[in-house]
Amino acid sequence: MNAKYCFEKKAKISVASDCYVGTAMNRNGDLVPALPQITITAEFDGEWESPEKLNADMKDCISKLQDAFCKHLYHR
């Protein structure tokens, strides 16, 4: 019988680029350096055969999220 690894985790995750891409106006009307940032609420709840399988599924989800974001960004 194969072991199953159960994972249940929900977290708000923010990541920002290290690359300066220009300027943007903040809520106060001030120009500030523009750094691309993405914030998501990530939720994983299920059973995987191994932590490596979970990692592979997460990478696949992140890749699909990136593709969807780029389609939305560039095809308005």
Image (cartoon, rainbow, N blue to C red):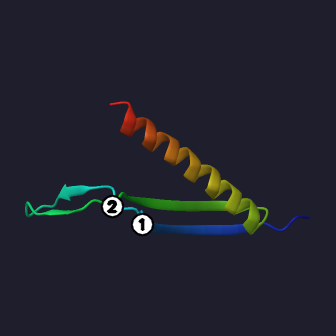
**Looking at the image, which residue sits at the far left?**
29
Residue linked to disc 1: 18
Q: In the image, residue 36 lies at what x, y percent?
A: 36, 57
Q: In the image, residue 13 lies at what x, y percent?
A: 43, 66
Residue linked to disc 2: 35
How crowded is the residue under tag 2: few (<14 C-alpha within 10 Å), some, or many (20+)? some
Q: Mark 2: which amino acid?
A: Leu
Residue 4 is left or right of residue 15, and the answer is: right
Residue 29 is left or right of residue 53, and the answer is: left
The residue under the point 79% across, 62% down is: 49
**Looking at the image, which residue sits at the far top?**
75
Q: Mark 1: which amino acid?
A: Asp
In front: 63, or 21? 21
Query: Looking at the image, do the residues carrying marks 1 and 2 touch, with CB atoms under 8 Å apart?
Result: yes
Q: In the image, residue 23 lies at what x, y percent?
A: 22, 57
Residue 51 is left or right of residue 39, and the answer is: right
